[in-house]
Image: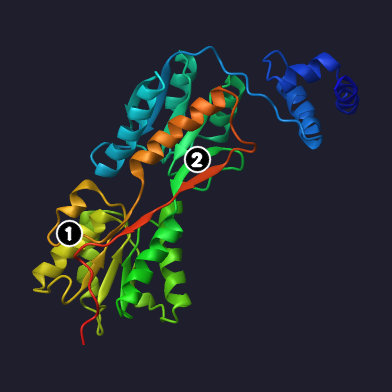
Amino acid sequence: MAVQLAQIATEAGVSIPTVSKVLNSRPDVSRATRDRVAAVLERHGYEIRMRPRMATGFLDMRVVNLDQAWSEAVVRGAAEAAKAHGKDLVLAVEPDPEDCDEWVMHALERGSDGLLSVVAVPSPEARVQLAEAGIPLVVVDPLHRMPEGTFSIAATNFQGAFDAAQHLIELGHRRIATITGPLDQDNGIARLAGFQAALQQAGVPVDDGLIIRTQYGIDQGYDATRILLTRDSRPTAIFAASDDSALGAIRALREADLRIPDDMSVIGFDDLPHSSWIDPPLTTIRQPLAQMGSAAVDVIVRVRAGRHPHPAARTELSTTLVVRSSTAPLRG
């Protein structure tokens, strides 16, 4: 080992003790030197050992809002996991889905055992500061694809949407509409892609007129369905990319005196707690929301214990098709 470190020191133009400091994430090395030595270490197959700060007992979690059952489920899972690991969860509710750097800076100043950000991705500068402080970060269901080597937890959005469309196809539907989520977000893009892939694989034409591009939400699902009902040849089934959108769709169909699922099948995505109480109970794709929160906590605990994979990147938890009464075989 000493000879190998000496070779690395020579290649990087530093001393052997400096190589050792970088390898063990000691703070007393300049940024430029650290980057140069780290590049040589990684080229030779070494893994930089994260040096955690002294444990504080706190985990910091940030959510955009708690008004939605989706967020509540993720927080609940994280809180239960934090308690199991003997940690206190400090929850921040901030409305900006993009800018979370101020939250990061506050946690850095106070000290934290790890940060869990729901959807918002800290800036590159903020992520560097967290890494240098030895504070792990996990982003749950990130809005955008995370840089390689950054921890994130998400669901299998593509596969879930594929399964939703395939379920409708197997019921005999061919004119299938979709009400998308936001297509500037990773999950919205993946769900539309999964829906289209299922149709293409089954040889069902993808009709762009049956794709309503919008945001998640009850109002959005309602408005989108009213548009779909104006089509010359209306769909026989709707895949709504969220349960809230599906709820809005159901209301619009009822106002048009259409029966569900006799006249129109509807399937959602999320399996929120109220989805089984909708009339009729909603067929949907279950996201493991609580497990996503608990998995994020588990990643932080493993990182601090030095038991994380390398490079630690994106983890996707499996979605599940839950068949209830809002979908049925195509009549006639």
Which amino acid does the dot numbered 2 rest on? Answer: Ser
Q: Are marks 1 and 2 in contact (CB under 8 Å)?
A: no
- The quarter of the picture where residue 58 lies is top left
- Residue 85, image x and y in percent? 41, 22
The circle drawn on residue 155 is none
Residue in the picture at 48% in, 48% down: 316
- The quarter of the picture where residue 93 lies is top left
Instruction: Give the SS element for disc 1.
Output: loop
The circle drawn on residue 152 is 2
**In the rendered view, does 76 fall on the left or right side of 189?**
left
Foreground label between 1 and 2: 1
Q: Can you say which quadrant of the picture contains the C terminus? A: bottom left
Q: Is residue 181 above or below residue 8?
A: below
Residue 99 visible: no
**In the rendered view, does 284 fall on the left or right side of 189?**
left
Between the C-alphas of marks 1 and 2, the distance is: 32 Å
The circle drawn on residue 281 is 1
Q: Can you say which quadrant of the picture contains the N terminus? A: top right
Residue 144 visible: yes
Residue in the picture at 29% in, 44% down: 70
Instruction: Give the SS element for disc 2.
Output: strand
Which amino acid does the dot numbered 1 rest on? Answer: Pro
Residue in the picture at 58% in, 21% down: 134
Category of crowding for the residue at label 2, using alpha-carbon neighbours closer than 10 angstroms: few (below 14), some (14–19), many (at least 20) = many
Q: Earlier in the sequence, mark 1 or mark 2?
A: 2
Which residue reaches farthest bottom? 332
